Image (cartoon, rainbow, N blue to C red):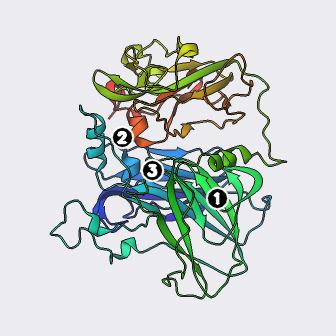
Amino acid sequence: MVSAEAGVRCYKWDVKYEFKSPDCYKKLAITINRKTSGPTILARQGDTVIVEVTNGLVTENLVIHWHRIRQPGTYLYHAHYGMQREAGLYGSIRVLLPDGVAEPFTYDYDRSIILNDWYHASTYEQAAGLSSIPFVWVEEPQSLLIQGKGKFDCSKLATPSSDPTACNTTNPECSPYVMTVVPGKTYRLRISSVTALSALGFQTEGHNMTIVEADGHYVEPIVVQNLFIYSGETYSVLIKIDQEPSRNYWITTNIVGRDATATTPPGLAILNYYPNHPKRVPPTDPPAGPIWNDTAPRLAQSVAIKARQGYVHTPPPKSDRVIVLLNTQNKIDGYTRWSVNNVSFTLPHTPYLTALKENLHHVFDQHPPPDRLHDFATYDIYRVVNNTNATSSNAIYRLKFNSTVDIILQNANTMTVNNSETHPWHLHGHDFWVLGYGTGKFDAENDPKNPPLRFVADNPGVWAFHCHIESHFYMGMGVVFEEGVEKVGKLPSEIMGCGETKAFKRP
């Protein structure tokens, strides 16, 4: 349900578990108003959005994160408690410009598409495996979903079910997503990824796509045949409906960066040229998509994306602080963990913001993590390193309010020989500038001074910075920044109730 009046948009959501079959396999999924993915939030710049949420999960808390809301454009919302995001709680946010304000490109119609990977194991099963000795990895997803729809081959079930509804390819819930288009028109596709693990390639068969927006910011137009998109990212592309109109075309997505060719089939949807029948299967095979381990075109896309002229927000010319974050995989007390500067992140029982506002200094570690690993200069990123001094901690970085911070992200070999992984990092509460990149080992003395990431600590609060891969963050790949907490007003009693804040909750 949605209503809009005088710049206030109100949504009412009922969140609960229901059995759903988005890829034909029936499993428990988290739904909003009985649907997954959830409803699109539509608003104009300057609007106030009120979302009234009823938590019907019964035995679980619920946190919803409004992903990257800072400017007009294309955004996401998703669960941010445990691993609930991959259980289906996610949706699109579309922020329009005020009436009378023009965008730097034109189109006839606007569509949102969310991409996701889908597991048949529950988030509880996955979390238990990640927290076990011996370690049990989540493996590759069973399916890829386009706008909440995919197709799993039921003959590949490890244990066939006697329940005929357990996996049913005729279930309308898993019929391919169909986007009907009018020949001759131009469409803006707002494409988002909420994958739990996978980096993706996205294609519209036979159609070029022009990238015009990335993460809520206008960019110089780039024409591509394949769009690479990582978990947590959003793009807008323009496509001209200019191909042979007597047929339909494939929309496809496939995994890159990991070898899932034998386990996860491409996600398929249909670009339906009106007035062809929407269920008319395209006469050609779906595009093969990019090669999973070809990194050159992925890097080329990232390097090519530049802020659009006329919409450039100039970064501060220098930083006040440089933090070098080395990502490593470690064993800590026998458990497999991800660590940053040899510290694997854990969450305290009492939320940071209330702990800091109420001076509960004893509820989390007061010794901040290091700005750089003490032996970073000699650390060998190309081999499996025995990080016996890795620890777990819930300590946080304390940033001076309004200071400029540079972040260097350094990948390293995992505990598997000749293996490194993709980590799409996400910063809560801030926009940031991507100013540089490099290959190999960062050299503070000789490398260019432009950092991968620069931001201004100008948003009072406590903000997570973490890998957007669900299992990686669950395993400790993240940090927390505090800035200007003293400027945050009195916290409402309604948010109390976790950890030692229970004592502050008034009836």
Residue 7 seen in render: no
Q: In this view, does 312 lie above or below 459?
A: below
> Whole-Å distance between the Cαs marked 1 and 2?
36 Å
Q: Where is residue 154 in the image (x, y as percent from the top left)?
A: 29, 68
> Whole-Å distance between the Cαs marked 3 and 2?
26 Å
Q: Position of residue 225 (x, y in %)?
A: 66, 62
Disc sitting over residue 6 in the figure: 1
Residue neighbourhood size for the residue with mark 2, other residues' Cα within 10 Å, grouped as few (<14), some (14–19), many (≥20)? some
Residue at left offset 41%, top offset 22% = 394
> Whole-Å distance between the Cαs marked 3 and 1?
51 Å
Q: Where is residue 152 in the image (x, y as percent from the top left)?
A: 35, 66
Q: In which quarter of the image is the C terminus?
A: top left
Disc sitting over residue 259 in the figure: 3
Residue type, mark 1 in image:
Ala
Q: Which of marks 3 and 1 is nearer the N terminus?
A: 1
Kindly indicate whether the residue at mark 2 contacts the one at mark 3 (C-beta within 8 angstroms).
Answer: no
Kindly indicate whether the residue at mark 2 contacts the one at mark 1 (C-beta within 8 angstroms).
Answer: no
Examine the image and state in which quarter residue 105 appears: bottom right
